[in-house]
Image (cartoon, helix red, strand yellow):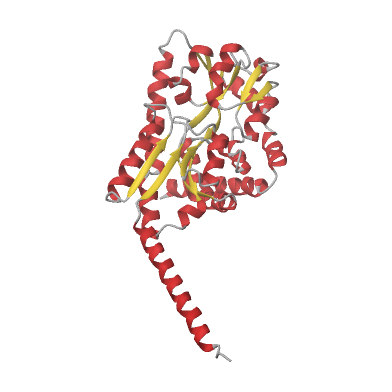
């Protein structure tokens, strides 16, 4: 009869060998170059394109050659909801999105697009940076996404093949909606015939008459040729799209802390991103104003009140349609708005 100890020793020795080989594999993996694919839709020459080029340059330079960043930022990975889903599945690791596009995966983002909530960019920036980042990060984590930072897209305005100066002008008009519930509810609240589609499909849809109008920021309107198909631009500034940069959560958190910090700081700061977009907005507003083929409509105080009245209940409709943590988000926004007012008062008294 054989004693079992030699067999146990052999098994233990094999276990040590296996553990050792796994450690070697782990060590070799740690030394492999960091490969990262970025997905976004950033037209050439826009601030977003420049930010992604800066991100690639900074990441690769600061990592001293151990990182390689592949940019797919011309919409190669599909529309925003598809690209964000690809990040969740780690098919790509990093990306940038509008709030409206990101809301297809994190629906509570729609609450940030409630019409006429923010009164100025100063108020918006303070609220987003001091309150909303921490509020939203857990919601992104539940979707296997890490919210890196807010960036900037700009105020949303109305465009159309005909003037849309008052809400009644949109009645029965075929309006393109973005992916967010906020956009869809906005279009129906002004009486539009709403059709949701990605931005990549918008210009062909305008050319064929499938849609006749919609909402977008000045930069996309000015650089994508949208003005040729929808030559009437109305500066409603009814909502502000901050934009987001996200990463696959599991992938990002598996990286060493110093690597995560390197990646996060390689992308321009929120303030830098905002300055880039807002500078281009000012430039394009002047350029569009001088374009005889485009008519820019500015709202009178009376017309602005009509837009506010037509959409005054939208926030409750958004909360109901989105569900989830949307009421908590809206409550946090209201709390942050009051905190901003106190912040301004304290600045004034100092």
Q: Is residue 206 above or below residue 349?
A: above
Observer-nearest of 80 and 286 = 80
Q: Residue furthest front?
A: 1
Q: Quadrant of residue 151?
A: top left
Q: Quadrant of residue 212?
A: top right
Taking the spot 41% from the left edge, 68% from the top edge, the residue there is 21
Q: Seen in the image, is 91 located left or right of residue 310?
A: left
Q: x and y percent of residue 208 in the render?
A: 60, 12
Callout count: 0
Taking the spot 56% from the left edge, 22% from the top edge, the residue there is 201
Q: Quadrant of residue 2?
A: bottom right
Q: x and y percent of residue 161 in the render?
A: 57, 12
Q: x and y percent of residue 4 in the render?
A: 55, 88
Observer-nearest of 123 and 319 = 319
Q: Seen in the image, is 51 located left or right of residue 153?
A: left
Q: Seen in the image, is 174 located left or right of residue 9?
A: right
Q: x and y percent of residue 210 in the render?
A: 63, 15
Q: Is residue 54 above or below residue 235?
A: below
Q: Is residue 299 visible?
A: no
Observer-nearest of 244 and 125 = 244
- Quarter that holds the N terminus: bottom right
Q: Is residue 322 above or below residue 18?
A: above
Q: Residue furthest top?
A: 292
Q: Is residue 81 visible?
A: yes
Q: Is residue 172 above or below residue 113?
A: above
Taking the spot 53% from the left edge, 32% from the top edge, the residue there is 78
Taking the spot 50% from the left edge, 44% from the top edge, the residue there is 91
């Amino acid at each position: 009869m054989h004693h079992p100890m030699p067999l146990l020793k052999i098994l233990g020795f094999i276990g040590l060998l296996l553990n050792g080989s796994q450690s070697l594999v782990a060590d070799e993996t740690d030394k492999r170059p960091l490969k990262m694919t970025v997905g976004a839709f950033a037209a050439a020459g826009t601030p977003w394109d420049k930010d992604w080029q800066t991100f690639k340059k900074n990441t690769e330079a600061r990592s001293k050659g151990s990182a390689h960043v592949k940019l797919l930022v011309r919409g190669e990975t599909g529309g925003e909801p598809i690209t964000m889903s690809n990040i969740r599945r780690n098919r790509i690791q990093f990306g940038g999105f509008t709030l409206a596009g990101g809301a297809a995966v994190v629906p509570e983002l729609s609450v940030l697009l409630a019409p006429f909530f923010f009164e100025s960019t100063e108020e918006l920036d303070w609220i987003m940076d001091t309150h909303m980042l921490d509020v939203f990060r857990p919601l992104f984590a539940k979707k296997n996404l890490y919210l890196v930072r807010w960036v900037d897209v700009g105020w949303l305005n109305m465009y159309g093949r005909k003037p849309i100066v008052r809400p009644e002008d949109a009645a029965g008009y075929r309006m393109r909606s973005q992916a967010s519930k906020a956009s869809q509810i906005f279009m129906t609240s002004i009486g539009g015939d709403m059709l949701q589609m990605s931005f990549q499909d918008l210009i062909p849809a305008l050319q064929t008459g499938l849609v006749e109008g919609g909402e977008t920021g000045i930069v996309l309107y000015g650089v994508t040729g949208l003005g040729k198909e929808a030559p009437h631009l109305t500066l409603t500034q009814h909502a502000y799209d901050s934009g987001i940069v996200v990463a696959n959560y599991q992938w990002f958190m598996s990286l060493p802390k110093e690597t995560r910090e390197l990646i996060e700081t390689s992308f321009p700061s929120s303030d830098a991103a905002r300055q880039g977009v807002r500078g281009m907005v000012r430039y394009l507003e002047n350029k569009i104003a001088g374009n005889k083929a485009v008519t820019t409509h500015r709202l009178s105080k009376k017309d602005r009140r009509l837009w506010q009245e037509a959409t005054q209940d939208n926030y409750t409709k958004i909360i109901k349609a989105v569900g989830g943590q949307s009421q908590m988000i809206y409550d946090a926004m209201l709390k942050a708005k009051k905190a901003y007012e106190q912040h301004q008062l304290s600045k004034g008294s100092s």
